[in-house]
Amino acid sequence: MREIILDTETTGLDPQKGDRLVEIGCLELLNSIPTGQVFHQYIDPQRDVPDEAFRVHGLSREFLAGKPLFADVADDFLEFIGEDRLVIHNAEFDMRFINAELARIGRPPLGMARVVDTLAIARKKHPGASNSLDALCSRYKIDNSRRTKHGALLDSEILADVYCELMGGRQTALVLQTSVAKVVREIKVVRGARTSKLPSMLSPSEQDAHEQLVAQIGDKAFWNQYRSES
């Protein structure tokens, strides 16, 4: 099964008040395993970046100026995510921004039916606890030391590990490993000589060519050590 881990960074909290996307990061999973295929794009929001947003992700107006517009990357983004499941932490936030950008260029919105919200999953598993991405990393012993600031692609990579834990990934892997080890222990490997020689699959001409090659090499030919066993 193909799934897409997705995260965004923005200029603020509300696209209806003029806030825009500044970064999209996506990571592909196949059967819960990252494939290495990613979509990552900085986006020119065509507006200022408030200090509050800059302190979160560190993307300045100067850095973003001249980057592609969302309209320029929309086709590549939509092609990458396809029709597959989207895995997002606090999905309602990211989807509002993505759909607002799609609406600006006359594209249909993405439906929430295809979205898995890891924040909702975490709240069900850990009611009353903090379920931010950093808190989940701490709970599941996931290294997030690179996360000095928010970044869409980096957060997608971290979320892939968190998602695996939320779905029982490491525990499931441990059970599988234990089961495999048990099966291996129960396999009895019988070693010994064959009771009868296997028939040769070489044609007569191929056998003659091989004999001539061995003769040319002489006593150093390693095939000679098997002649006594034949």
Image (tube, rainbow, N blue to C red):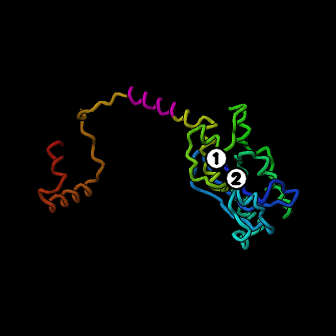
- Magenta stretch prevailing secondary structure: helix
| Disc 2 residue type (three-letter) | Asp
Residue 53 appears in which quarter of the rendering?
bottom right
Whether residue 165 sits left or right of residue 211 in the image: it is: right
Provide the secondary structure element on which disc 2 rests: strand
Q: Residues within 10 Å of mark 2 (few under 14, many from 20)?
A: many
**Which numbered marker is on residue 159?**
1
Give the residue at x 45% y 32%. 180
Q: What span is in magenta?
A: 174-186
Q: Residues within 10 Å of mark 1 (few under 14, many from 20)?
A: many
Mark 1 near mark 2, Cβ–Cβ under 8 Å? yes
Percent of width and height locating residue 65: 73, 72
Residue at label 2?
7
Whether residue 202 sits left or right of residue 18 in the image: it is: left
Percent of width and height locating residue 215: 14, 59
The front one of 164 and 215 is 164
